[in-house]
Image: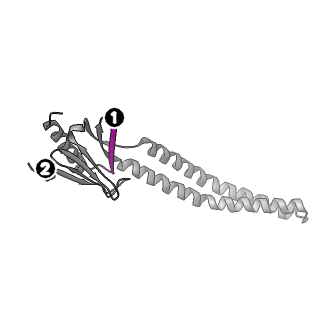
């Protein structure tokens, strides 16, 4: 087995380390990024872990944003109707005094704000759907532990190729007697 022949390779195509390439050689692990490179001798590697994980915080935020969207949508109609009714009563009794003008302007502003609530509700629902999709996709994370240092390489979704890379790396580590 040649030291220069790679045993396995994996290119990270999503996540924070997008564009990085993980390469396993007979005696070393190499991570090459756009502006960095790291080589770790396999003799220094203590453990290899690969896991598919979903972040429950994303689901919690998605649910909270969905509840907010529903509350905004539900409040929009009654708030518009109330502010329009209140403005009509002010106009009906208007003597064009300063208090009436202030009340009319306030109710008109509340009506415009209530008119924007459906748009805010739609944006909140869209953000909730995005977070729910990110939760559903999850991350496949390869974690390497050597000494007191841990390196994690994550990609979106369930990556069969990263799992196979980790399996090859673990088998090579076991073959070295680690």
| Residue 103 horizontal side relative to residue 45, left or right | right
Q: Residue furthest left?
A: 1
* Mark 2 Cα shell of 10 Å, populated few (<14), some (14-19), many (≥20): few
The quadrant in which the C terminus is found is top left
Residue found 75% across the figure and 62% down from its top: 108
- Residue assigned mark 1: 148
| Residue 77 horizontal side relative to residue 162, left or right | right
Frontmost residue, 18 versus 100: 18
Residue 51: give x, y in percent of width and height.
29, 41
Q: Is residue 95 above or below residue 36?
A: below
Q: Tell me, for residue 100, which label it has, or none.
A: none
Residue 26: give x, y in percent of width and height.
15, 46
Whether the magenta-drawn stretch holds residue 137 is answered as no
* Mark 1 Cα shell of 10 Å, populated few (<14), some (14-19), many (≥20): few
Magenta residues span: 147-157
Please tell me whether mark 1 sits on a helix, a strand or a loop: loop
Q: Is residue 139 above or below residue 176?
A: below
Majority secondary structure of the magenta segment? strand
Frontmost residue, 21 versus 4: 4
| Residue 9 horizontal side relative to residue 133, left or right | left
Residue 168: give x, y in percent of width and height.
17, 44
**Where is residue 110, by image quadrant?**
bottom right
Residue found 48% across the figure and 43% down from its top: 60
Please tell me whether mark 2 sits on a helix, a strand or a loop: loop
Q: Tell me, for residue 3, which label it has, or none.
A: 2
Residue 132: give x, y in percent of width and height.
43, 50
| Residue 150 horizontal side relative to residue 109, left or right | left
């Amino acid at each position: 087995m040649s030291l220069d022949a790679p045993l396995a390779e994996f290119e990270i195509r999503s996540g924070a380390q997008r564009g990085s390439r993980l390469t396993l050689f007979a005696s070393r692990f190499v991570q090459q990024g756009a502006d960095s490179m790291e080589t770790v001798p396999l003799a220094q590697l203590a453990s290899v872990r690969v896991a598919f994980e979903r972040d429950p915080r994303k689901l919690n935020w998605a649910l909270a944003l969905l509840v907010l969207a529903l509350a905004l949508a539900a409040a929009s109609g009654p708030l518009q109707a109330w502010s329009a009714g209140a403005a009509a009563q002010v106009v009906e009794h208007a003597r064009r005094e300063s208090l009436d003008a202030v009340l009319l302007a306030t109710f008109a502003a509340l009506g415009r704000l209530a008119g924007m609530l459906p748009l805010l509700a739609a944006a909140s629902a869209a953000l909730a759907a995005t977070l729910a999709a990110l939760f559903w996709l999850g991350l496949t994370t390869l974690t390497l532990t050597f000494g007191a240092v841990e390196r994690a390489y994550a990609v979106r979704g369930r990556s069969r190729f990263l799992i196979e890379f980790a399996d090859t790396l673990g088998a090579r580590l076991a073959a070295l007697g680690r």
